[in-house]
Image (tube, rainbow, N blue to C red):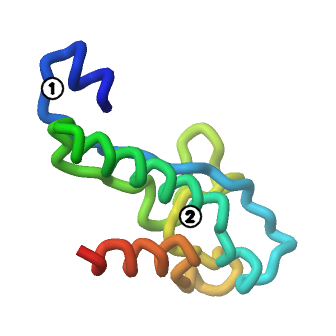
Amino acid sequence: MMYIKNYYKNPTTYITENGVAEANNSSLSVEEALKDNLRLVYHYGHLTYLSRAIKGGADVRGYFVWSFLDDFEWDAGYTIRFGLNYIDFKDNLKRYRKHSALWFQKFLHKG
């Protein structure tokens, strides 16, 4: 973001899709699948540096996680998961909040 600020005259920026894919491991229990620590650390790192950039004057107006729910990806089908919320494809599409969703809730309520 600082590169964009410095070399492109600090345009207003929205980060519209940022996320990390994890393999859909159907052998995991729902409880195990909710432990998406890789996603949590990924977003924590991005938001830490994004916060520094904003404090340094970068004109960032929005950050949007990809994605809210696990979904069908056009090039990978259901073989990967992106969502903050787990979709149980084996149990009537029940939804469960992953650890990353709980972290985001706390993060958003700090300010």
Residue 107: x %, y % from top left: 37, 73
Q: Residues within 10 Å of mark 1 (few under 14, many from 20)?
A: some
Give the distance between the C-alpha atoms of the residues marked 1 and 2, in whole angstroms: 28 Å
Q: What secondary structure is marked by label 1?
A: loop
| Above or below, 54 relative to 93 | above
Q: What amino acid type is highlighted by mark number 2? A: Leu
| Above or below, 60 relative to 10 | below
Depth check: 70 or 93 in front? 70
Farthest residue in the top direction?
A: 7
Residue 33: x %, y % from top left: 71, 75
Residue at the image point whose x is 52% and y is 81% from the top: 97
Residue 95: x %, y % from top left: 53, 82
Foreground label between 1 and 2: 1
Farthest residue in the front direction?
A: 56
Residue at the image point whose x is 66% and y is 59% from the top: 38
| Above or below, 43 relative to 101 | above
| Above or below, 102 relative to 67 | below
Residue 20: x %, y % from top left: 57, 49
The residue that mark 2 highlights is 40
Depth check: 46 or 76 in front? 46
The residue that mark 1 highlights is 10
Depth check: 7 or 21 in front? 7
Left or right of 110 on screen, residue 21: right
Left or right of 17 on screen, residue 98: right
